[in-house]
Amino acid sequence: MNLRATDCVLRMMHEEEHDLESYQASIPRWCNGCGDNAILAAVQRLCRDEKLRPEKTVFVSGIGCSSRFPHYMKTYGFHSIHGRALPIAEGIKLTRPDLKVFVSTGDGDCCSIGAAHWIHAVRYNMNMIVVLHDNHIYGLTKMQASPTSPAGLKSKTTPRGAYLQALNPLTVTLGVQNVSFVAQAVDWLPEVVYDVLAAAFHHKGLSFVRIIQRCPEFLPQHLDPWLHDPKRNLLLTHENGIAISAGLGKVYKNQRTHDPADLNRAREIASVEDPIPVGILYRNPDVPCYEETRHLSVLTTPDRVRAGLEKELDKFTVWPQERRDEAR
Amino acid sequence: MMNEALASARAPAAGSPPPRAARQKAALALDEHVVEIVSDSGEGAQRCGQSLGSIAARMGNGVWTVEIIPAEIQPPARSIEGASGNRVRLGAKRMANGGNEADLVVAFNEQVLIGRVRAGELKPGCTILLESAWREHADAKIAASYVETHDRLVAEGYKVIEIPMERECRKHVPDPRRGKNMFVLGMLCSIYSLDLQLAREQIAFAFGKKNESVVRANVRLLEAGHEWAEANLEFKYRIPAVPVESPQVVINGNTALALGVLASGMEVCAMYPITPATSASHYLSEAFESVGGIVHQAEDEIAACAFAIGASYAGKCAITITSGPGYSLKQEAIGLAVMCEIPLVVVNVQRGGPSTGQPTKAEQGDLLAACFGSHGDAPKVVMAPATIEDCFYSIITARKIAETFNTVVVVLSDANLATSQQPFARPSFEDSWLAPPVDQSAVDEGAKPYDWDPVTGLARRLVPGQPHGMHTLTGLAHDRRSRVAYDPGINEEAIRHRSLKLAALQKSLQTPPVFGGDSGDLLVIGWGSTKGAIEESVERLRAEGLRVSSMHLMFLQPMPAGIKEIMRRFGQVMTIENNWSDRLEDELIDESNRRYSALAMMLRARYLVDVDCWSEVRGQPIKPGTIERVLRDKLKAKGRRP
């Protein structure tokens, strides 16, 4: 990493040790066994390991079970409205590139009501981590089919089974121009959840991480076939991907070497949903970030505003007649 | 070729210019004149009108220009609905509205003229300067249509003067379609005795970006038009001008809004394209970056509002600019900003509604949506600029209020202000217009994000980056520490404090001044862009001795103190608004079901005063002559003290 001397000094001044408790706010009100708990634990660990300053970290969310996330972090947080976490996070990041921005969203929040923002957030490619908590169901409103519910899934709104094929968040994201980071994890492999989030954190650009998680309340056995059969989990390995520990590798033998630089192969892997691909599908650190493209070296100061305003007003000013000749 | 005989039917023959002395026509002195220039889209009538306005403003005339905009980008040529151009009201005094029907019209073809006649925009018997080339058009149908329209207009009493504009222009440029507008500008400079040198300078300014030969060609056409009118037209006017003593800017309301954003020190404007608001963002996109600002074009209206909320939350107050349909889409996000007490300025440049309505047309239909929109109790500040100058200053004020009270401020402009131009005193920048830098200092441990003052409801906003200030904002009901409120008492406490902020602001507002006399038979109350027209009609009626006054509200929510006391001093009170109200002459409409205009409804509800209203929704600014008639009728009807 190439740091200027001042940055190094600043970093040393501000680098502080925080224990896990420094990031823990109130006790989560999620159900026992909810996959959100696993994600929260991994994120709090990540904050500690990366020594994030709580006051410089912002968690933004929309509405849904997963969007309770910011309440459980002792950082700045913004629990907003359904589907709109991404544009709010973009406004924050554009104004304050110094803040670390995380977005927690769910399959309803991101892939349904906020789908337009999701597509465009990938295009903007702002430097933030977006975690899609995907449990294939609306939990907070008590069991309606979501866009990622598999066809045939019975819910309160689809008593005879979901009518449509599930939307695949990975292929959608990988299909958007400017995509720069896509990874997937499953809540029953917490060490992969952590590794994927850590890789996302170190990526510069929008890191889209989908975490497939269980909803013990409304879909208790729904993910059991994958949970109980390691073969149905495909671990993606590569020297530029995540490292699979020896212990994990012993059980999860279904592995495949995949270079995260290969977009076409990433799309191919993403399109197969069984076995579930786990790991980093795509990473391209060279995609420009919107906040850098748009960021101005110019600061708004009174002198600058005065000069700018005078210059603009000059374009429209009608000077008194006697001043006409002076002006020339 | 032109038919010489016809072309000169009303104007003397265009031969070699007569000796200078013979051209000295006595100029008729006028108090004011309304001139319209209409053409097909792309023929430059708008530029011609705007230039005329700027030249007259430099002479010291009062000026108000109004754009005539077709709904389509490229309407078919020679179509009634395709009329594009400008209405310019020139006066000896300051002009505060577009005036009544036009006194003089320049039309590039007879079809665009028909549109203006049908819209009732021409004064009966007014002068029409009509391009005569169509009479000789190769297409017999076009020629016949021209003759028919011409003859009908003459029969209807209009003073139609056919002018061979194209033929004259062709003497100077190969393509008369380009540049005819400058020929017309020259004619108008002659007709209104405007300084030709100022016109040359205006052209140099308008075409300055292009090369010198373009400027020279246009100046040549300007002079040709001027010379032609001097030689061939029998009339000439002079509108006395008071030379300007201080610098004036001539801009439209949207440019004024954009300059206001720049001058307010806001740094982020998030928007999504929508007519008639977008031109403010266009202009801002050009000018904003030099002072450290950014215009973000979001993927939709909701995202634009959410983006601005995010930017405000993490830094200085941000702004989003939209029009009716976009304003509807933003409602949920506006409620979030109210709930989380995030400063935000929302501009709604109102257009005709509901739904897609009349995108390019003026209406004041969004007042109630602005005051009471979003769900639940979502108090927000609503203000409405009444002049072009107000458009500039209201944004600076809005930013300040938003940041002082940590609330949403809605600024209601409209299509009338957006596209009208009016000179006003050049603003002189003050440092106090800007927001202080974002506070990043540490707060006391345990500082509460909503430490509501029991009297004013105000609390210090904590911004990300401030050590010890960490908290999670939520759209859920919450307590002082922003913890989700499960206790009904806490919910009420929060709502009470958010509501108190409006009262705190209200205590700092001044009672609006009364225009006219302090008491009388009739008080007219208005808001927004109707101010100029209302005051002009009140002035005329008062000159006749009628006891009528007016009051214009800049703050619609909260309303300043003292309004009720003022209303009580008048026999009758009514509002004039550019929105819908049921008409009592309709069979089913009576006092028990009549839907009142928005402001009338709010005044009736708040002050228990029997406020009547008159309104129209013709998509046009209300004419002072119309208001004059309405007020006269109202005064005639027997009024009772409310």
Image (spheres, coloured by chain):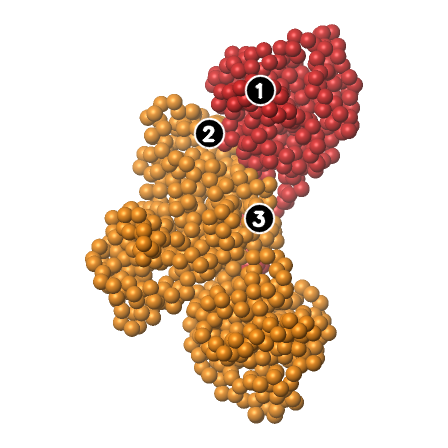
Residue at left offset 39%, top offset 64%: B533
The alpha-carbon separation of the residues under discs 3 and 1 comes to: 41 Å
Are dots 1 and 2 on a single chain? no
Residue identifier under label 3? B273
For residue B474, the mark is: 2
Seen in the picture, residue B373 relative to B616 is either above or below; the reply is: above
Q: Which element type, helix, strand or loop, lies under badge 2?
A: strand
For residue A161, the mark is: 1
Residue A110 sits in quarter: top right
Q: Which element type, helix, strand or loop, lies under badge 3?
A: loop
Q: Give the tally of numbered discs.
A: 3
Name the amino acid, label 2.
Thr
Residue at left offset 58%, top offset 82%: B229
Residue A307 sits in quarter: bottom right
Could you tell me which quadrant the C terminus of chain B lies in?
Answer: bottom left
Residue B122, image x and y in percent? 47, 71
Could you tell me which quadrant the N terminus of chain B lies in?
Answer: bottom right
The chain containing the residue under callout 1 comes to: A
Q: Which chain is orange?
A: B
The chain containing the residue under callout 2 comes to: B
Seen in the picture, residue B359 relative to B230 is either above or below; the reply is: above
